[in-house]
Image (spheres, grey):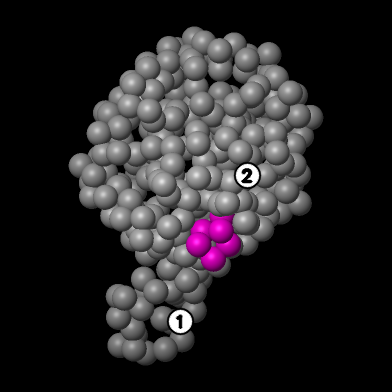
Amino acid sequence: VTLLTVAEILKPSIKNGWAVGAYDVPDISVAQGILDAAVADEAPVILMIYPAFVPTEYYKTYVSFIKEEIQRSGAKAAIALDHGSNIAEINAAIGAGFTGVMIDASKEPFDKNIETTKTVVDAAHAYGISVEAELGQVGLGSDILPEDQMKSLYTKVIDSKQFVDRTGVDSLAVAIGTAHGLYKFEPKLDFERLQQLRAELEIALVLHGSSGTPNDQLAQAVKFGINKINVYTDIRMKVLESIREKVMADPIEMYDIPDLMAITRKDTKTVVQEKNILFGSTGKSKLYK
Ligand SMILES: [Zn+2]
């Protein structure tokens, strides 16, 4: 079996000091680049569909393509919904054959987040699909908040155990100082909090907003118990820079659309291979049957 659920793919990493890279897939060439890296490094990977990039009516098309590519490559991989925000997206993902879904009700009050997450867990587990939820809020790198306000959004250790017990969720996205997209401030992760969360919980912990976070802090987060790291902006920026460099330097007629897709595939592979080393996932495919 090469297609795994998100819970299956994360399990060997829990409390073992390494993490699986999870990448948003806005197009075919990105999926191929991720799988190229997975095969080259014998590293497990998670391919994610982000609702803002792919409307729900295309989930089936996307998943059938990605599944075929996973089978062809032989990579150990899972297919997950990233930041599902409503039941329509969750149901579409379940119906399309995703092997994991994320429900992000992190902006809701604690009890409402639990209620929404529990509803999704019940629906997804009926199909053997894993669920990730978010507690605390991982914000945007473009939002510069005063430190006390930012820290008030961090995952509270005291709430985390209750949240996991009451929802039955398989993995938890934690807010410990990272943010989505491009940073306008220097992230400084709260490792004390991460260690407390790791000691409190048995499930996989997820870090969003890794792009732009200094590598030494990411390595430390992995060491202290993060098991899934979401990446998108690092791929986006590398691909865009390559395309700008090449297309701006040469007469535009020299390029065709497949050339741009080839650049995208190659750059994605490069970024994912860097992450495989940083996250310690290189060579870990052999841990799966
Ligand atoms: Zn995220």
Residue sitting farthest toward the left:
57
Where does label 1 land, which residue? 246
Q: From this viewpoint, is residue 280 visible?
A: yes
Q: With respect to residue 265, does 282 lie above or below?
A: above
Which residue type does callout 1 highlight?
Answer: Lys
Q: From this viewpoint, is residue 231 visible?
A: no
Q: Nearer the viewer, residue 120 or 109?
A: 120
Where does label 2 land, which residue? 19
> Does mark 1 have its CB less than 8 Å from ligand 1?
no
Q: Residue at x 60, y 26 (%)?
A: 203
**Magenta span of residues:** 38-43
Q: Nearer the viewer, residue 151 or 197?
A: 197
Mark 2 lies on a secondary structure that is loop
Residue 219 lies, in percent from the top left, at 73, 48
* For residue 282, side relative to residue 40 (left or right): right
Q: With respect to residue 73, does 86 lie above or below?
A: above
Q: Is 42 colored magenta in this rendering?
A: yes
